[in-house]
Amino acid sequence: MDAPPPVNSPSTPRNIYVFGLTSFLNDTASEMAYWVLPAFLASLGAGPAQLGIIEGVAESVASFAKLFSGYVTDRVSERKPIVVAGYIVANAVKPLLALVSSWWQILGIRFSDRFAKGIRGTARDVMVAESVDNANLGSAYGLIQALDSAGAIAGPLLALIARTGEALGSFKLEDGRRGQVADFTVAAGSPLVGRDLSDAIRAAEPAAPSEPILFTTDDEISEGSMKPASPFQRVARIARVYATVKQPNHLQTVIAEVPVDGEQHLIKFSRYYDNPQFWTVPGERDERLHGRKTTTVTEPEPDEYELYDLTLDPTEERNLAHPSHADDHSHALQQTMLGLLIEQLAAKRLTPSTGDRPRYRRPAIT
C-alpha cells in the first residue's frame, strides 16, 4: 500500500511570507546604501578602478560562498541558524559605511555583506523547499524572488527621495534657479511672516555691483567641544577612522562672482590653516592632545583648501581643490580665488601689519 503524501503544517505559508518580507527589507536596505556608492567613493578620492575591484571581489566571494554553504547545508539538520546568522552579519556591517575614510574599508564591508548573502542563500532555499510541497515550489520561489526584486527597486527610490530632500531642504525652486529663491519655513511648517521682495530687488535698475564676501575666524577655544549629533560620528571620532580638516577652527573664506568660461559664476574658496598665534607658546611650539597622548608641534600643518562653483554645485558636493576633482582649469581658478582672498584681507585690514604677531602665516600663491 502506498504511503500517503506528507501533509504540510498550517504554518507552511507563513514561512514563505516571512522569507519574502525579509528578502524585501534586506534588499531595500542594501540598495539604499549601495546605490550612492559610486558618488561616495568619488568623495573619498577613489575612482572607477576601485569601484570595479570592490564589486568584482564582492560578487566573486558571494558565488564561492554558495559552494561552501551548499556543502555545510547538506551536513546539518538545523539550517535556520545559518540563515539568521547570514542576515545578522549583512545588516550589521552596512551601518559601518558611515565610518569609512578610504575605499579599502568599503571593500571589507562589501566582502562581509556578500559573503553573508552567499552563506545564507543555499540554506534558505532548502528551507523553502522543505516548507511547501512539490506542486507549490514554483509559486513559493516566485513570490520570494518578486519581493526580492521589489526591494531592489524600492531601495534606490527611497535613497533618491532622501538625497533629494537633503539637497533641497527648505529651498523652493523657481524658474529653475536652484537655491536662488528660498522659502524658509519654521519647524512647524508655517512660512515666516513678511513680504517676498526678491522680484522687486532683481528688477531694480541699475543692478548693484557684486562685491566679494570675506569671512574669517580663529576659534581655538571651542576646538573639539561640540558633540556630534550622530552616534556614528561619535564612534568615528573616538576610533579616529575618518579624515577631517586638520585645522577647522582657523578659516579664511571668500565668495565672489568671477568669470568662468565666459560667464559669471559664484565661487566659494576657503583656506584652512594652522595659526601659530594660537599655539601654547605663540610662534614657537604647540602642545596637542591626541587621545591620552600629548605631542609637541613646532611646524604648522600644511594649508588645506575647499573650492566650490556654487553656480553649478549649490550644495557643495564637489570640492574642486581635492585631487580627485582638480585639473588645470580648477587649479587656475583656485589661484585666482587665492589672489582675491589676499586682496580682501589686505583691503579690509585683517592681515596683521604692526605689533607683536608672531609667526602669522599669510596665504601664498603657488
Image (tube, helix red, strand yellow):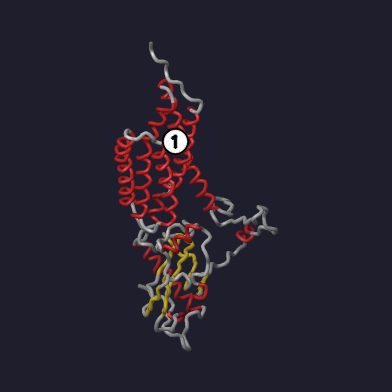
Which residue occupies the foreground of this view, 11 or 306? Answer: 11
Residue shown at 39%/72% (left/top)? 303
Horizontal arrangement in the rendering, residue 129 relative to residue 345 (left or right): left
Task: Name the outermost residue toward the right.
Answer: 193
300 to 153, vertically: above or below: below
Q: Quadrant of the C terminus?
A: bottom left
Q: Rate crowding at label 1 as few (under 14), some (14 to 19) or many (20 or more) other CA atoms within 10 Å.
A: many
Q: Does the image show residue 338?
A: no
Report x, y in % for residue 355.
Answer: 48, 89
Horizontal arrangement in the rendering, residue 222 relative to residue 247 (left or right): right
294 to 242, vertically: above or below: below
Q: Quadrant of residue 194?
A: bottom right
Q: Could you tell me which secondary element the residue under label 1 belongs to?
A: helix
Horizontal arrangement in the rendering, residue 223 relative to residue 105 (left or right): right
Report x, y in % for residue 160.
Answer: 49, 46
Report x, y in % for residue 214.
Answer: 51, 71
Amino acid residing under circle 1: Asp
Which residue occupies the foreground of this view, 210 or 344? Answer: 344
Task: Name the outermost residue toward the top.
Answer: 1
Residue shown at 65%/59% (left/top)? 197
The tally of labels here is: 1
Residue shown at 59%/52% (left/top)? 172
Residue underneath mark 1: 148
